[in-house]
Amino acid sequence: MASGELKGHFDVAVAKDLSGKESTSAVSTGDGDGIQITCFTEDLNDVTFHFQIIRLEKQIYAWIGCNSAKLGHLYAAAPTRPNNAVSVASILGGASDNTGSSIARRIVLKTGLNVILACNIPKNSPMLEADAERKLMEKLKELGYTRSRSQGSVLSNS
Amino acid sequence: MDHHSGRRFAVPHKKLSLDIKGTKTDLIICSYDDYFLVMVTQIGSMGTILHAKKEEGVSIHPTFAVSVIFGKRDEPMLMACARQLIEHISNSGSSKPLVLSLGLKDHSLETLKGVASALIENRLW
C-alpha cells in the first residue's frame, strides 16, 4: 500500500490546545464548510471537566471528560420518525448506568441534533451530570450548533 | 473559569482532509487515555462505528477482536480496515483499543486502502 495511491492535495491541520483555554480550529474548504473541533476545560466545584465537540455536517460528536481523559461510555442519540421522539442507543460501555445516556437524550431534545456522545462521568453523580450537561449545552448554543426543534426535523434525507 | 495556562488539552488530536478517488475525505484522530478514536468521513456524519482491540493472551502472536458497534454489519471491508489499524497500533507498541468510524461513500478496496494508509501516515500511536 503506497502513499502514492493518495491523490490530490493533502491539508493537514494539527490542532493543539496550548493554554488549556478554549481552542476552536476549523479547516475551511472550497465549499465553505469544514469540520470544527472545539476543546475546552473547566473547573466546576473542584471537578475538572474536559469537553470536546466535533461538528460534522450532519452530526455532532461530543466528549465529556470528568477528571480524566478516558473515553467513557459511548451513546448515539437522534430524533427518530415518525414524531421526532428521541431515541438513544448505548454503543460502547454498557447501559447499566444511565450516565451519559440521559445527557445525550436531553441534548437531542433541546437541539434536534444527531449526536454521538462519549462521557466518563462516574455513575450516581447527578450533580456532576447536571453541571457537565449545562456547560455543554451553553457551549453548543454559543457555537451556534443548536437548532430549534420547531424548525422541523434536522435529519437530512439525502 | 479556571485557566490552565501552559497545558495542552487533555486529549491530543489531529485533523486533516484529503482526496480519495475524487471524494473529499476528512480524518480526525484523537488519543484518549484508554482509546484511540479515529473518524473518517465523506458523508458528513460518522457512519459506521467499529471497535477493535487486542486480546489478552500468552501466545507470541497477538489476536484481535473487531466488531461493528453501530451501523453496517455486512461490510467486510470496514472490518478489514479496523483490523489492519489495530494491528498497526499494536505493532507500534500501544495496547489501547480503537474506536473507528467510517462514513464512506463507497467501500471499495481502493478507498479503504487509501483510508488506512492516510491514517497510518498521520497516526498518533
Image (cartoon, coloured by chain):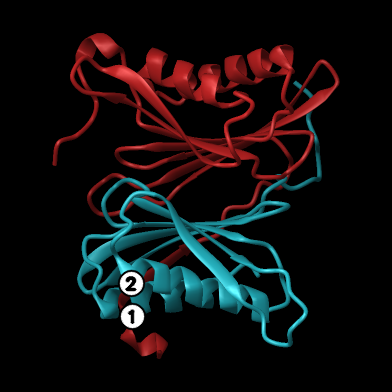
Q: Residue at x 45, y 20 (%)?
A: A105
Which residue type does callout 1 highlight? Leu
| Chain A, hue in figure | red
Report which residue position mark 2 lands on. Answer: B77
| Chain B, hue in figure | cyan
Q: Give the structural element (helix, strand or loop) at label 1.
A: loop
Q: In this view, does A148 lie above or below B71?
A: above
Q: Which residue is drawn at 72% across and 12% down?
A: A127
Q: Which of A65 and A19 is in front in this view?
A: A65
Figure quadrant of residue A19: top right
Give how far across and how far down residue A65 sits, in percent.
69, 35
Name the outermost residue toward the left: A158
Q: Which of B68 and A31 is in front in this view?
A: B68
Q: Give neighbour class at mark 2: few <14, some 14-19, many 20+ (Cα, 10 Å).
A: some
Q: Which label lies toward us, 2 or 1? A: 2
Report which residue position mark 1 lands on. Answer: A6
Which residue type does callout 2 highlight? Met
Residue A139 in view in this figure: no
Figure quadrant of residue B96: bottom right
Give how far across and how far down residue A64 sits, in percent.
63, 33
Q: Which residue is drawn at 66% across and 46% down?
A: A17
